[in-house]
Amino acid sequence: MPESLAITKISDLANPTRFLGLAARILPFMAGITAILFAIGLYLTFASKGDYQQGMTVRIMYVHVPAAWLSMMCYSVMAISAIGTLVWRHPLADVSHKTAAPIGAAFTLIALATGSLWGRPMWGTWWVWDARLTSVFVLFLMYLGLIALNRAMDDPSRAARVSAVLILIGFVNIPIIKFSVDWWNTLHQPASVIRMGGPTIDKEFLWPLLIMAIAFTLLFFTLHIAAMRNEIWRRRVSAQRRMAARMAGRTLAKEA
Amino acid sequence: MTALLLRDLKLSVRAGGGALIGVLFFMTVVAVIPFGVGPDLNLLSRIGPAIVWIGALLSALLGLDRMFQTDREDGSLDLILMQEHPLALTVLVKCLAHWLGNGLPLVIASPLLGLFMNMSEAAIGATMLTLLVGTPALTFIGAVGAAVAVALPRGGLLVSILVLPLAIPVLIFGVSASYAAVEDPAPFMPPFLILVAITMFFAVIGPIGAALALRNTAD
């Protein structure tokens, strides 16, 4: 039964030790491939000729667009993990959406900052209250709110379940971001790569962009798995510390 | 359910006057604005609907953290969790009671503040109508935040941070509908109907999410 095999594979990962083993094996490869892809992507970025209108500033796109995609994908990963937490009580899902939040916030910040830098020469302003900019800014605030919520609670499993509920409610924002440029006629340009009827962007720009996008995606997964590993280790350390503290209390009581 | 509604209403009106404080805060926020932007009546009448809406949004956030916290402190939250009715329905009733106690006074107070802001009759009416339709959505969204932060000792601030981003669409369409009623080219109905749709949407999502969060925070 192929389905049951997939299910057992995923539930096998519920054992943190197995996950740690897997992470230790694949992390070096992922980091290596990410580095290679970044090298190719950045080389292509600098080798490509500038746009005839935008000049050099078009190169900001190769960082801005993947970061913006990633900020949304990261939230989707968190939403899937949140479902995993609430429905299957999968222990790794808790760790997954907790650790994804800071990474997502970082990518969102990169997207906002590079967009702002790009907007200055192109639109003549650092910031406009345009539908997409505003909704991405709201996404950034939601990431920060989730991080704050996770830090406010002591019990990690309860914090995970509660923030999972909030993640799923906040997922409403993702379609709003995606379609904001289609629904409202705004300054930010509409989608030009992933759209019906093929990309409208020129091939010269498309290839470096795609490679940078894949590199960013791999970077996200590398960071995410590394962060999950760190979180599991952190929990083990704190559990052992608590145990040590309890034992210390006992030995002191015996001596006294 | 009716008993719960009445109980919550009585509590919100009597105990500590939570509802009245919300209205007072609303008035204070709106009254502070002319000090900030200057007493230019033309300018005030132009930004009036937006100011009234922002004031209402802030004061709607004010009472949210008490929504489930008082019940948790006196233990009735555990009874609510144990009863046979679907929890989402109970939360819906609690939201309604909270709105009647905290949201409705804001709507009633808004025409007075509209006068202060030198808004025209049409703008005052439109702002009141949009507040009437929009503030329930704020309560429903806030219920999720309140349920999430119920177990936290200092949850009030966190509730505001978590709820405000989700409340932005309500603010956008509420304000744009209020402006559309005054300015001719923009039609009033589309943003108003979207506001109604948002309220309906959160009336479903909010209680379900809040119920889920309450079940998970119960210790």
Image (cartoon, helix red, strand yellow):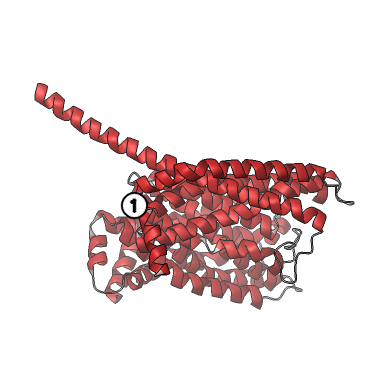
Location of residue A95 with respect to B8 vertically, above or below:
above
Residue at the location (53% across, 69% down)? B134
Horizontal arrangement in the rendering, residue A144 relative to residue A39 (left or right): left
Q: Residues within 10 Å of mark 1 (few under 14, many from 20)?
A: some
Where is residue B88 shown, x and y percent of the image? 35, 70
Horizontal arrangement in the rendering, residue A47 relative to residue A42 (left or right): right
Q: Secondary structure at mark 1?
A: helix
Please name the amino acid that badge 1 sits on.
Arg
Where is residue B194 shown, x and y percent of the image? 60, 74
Q: Nearer the viewer, residue B137 or A58?
A: A58
Subunit ID for the residue under disc 1 = A
Horizontal arrangement in the rendering, residue A244 relative to residue A8 (left or right): left
Q: Nearer the viewer, residue B205 or B33?
A: B205
Where is residue A64 shown, x and y percent of the image? 70, 49
Residue at the location (77% across, 45% down)? A45
Quarter of the figure with the C terminus of chain B: bottom left
Q: Residue furthest top?
A: A255
Where is residue A244 shown, x and y percent of the image? 24, 31
Q: Quadrant of residue B4?
A: bottom left
Q: Which residue is mark 1?
A: A158
Q: Quadrant of residue B49?
A: bottom right
Residue at the location (74% across, 58% down)? A188
Location of residue A224 with respect to B88 vertically, above or below:
above
Horizontal arrangement in the rendering, residue B140 relative to residue A254 (left or right): right
Q: Residue furthest right?
A: A52
Q: Is residue A251 visible?
A: yes
Location of residue A170 with respect to A116 vertically, above or below:
below
Residue at the location (35% across, 54% down)? B150
Q: Nearer the viewer, residue A230 or B56?
A: A230
Location of residue B29 with respect to B195 vertically, above or below:
above
**Could you tell me how many numbered marks the image carries?**
1
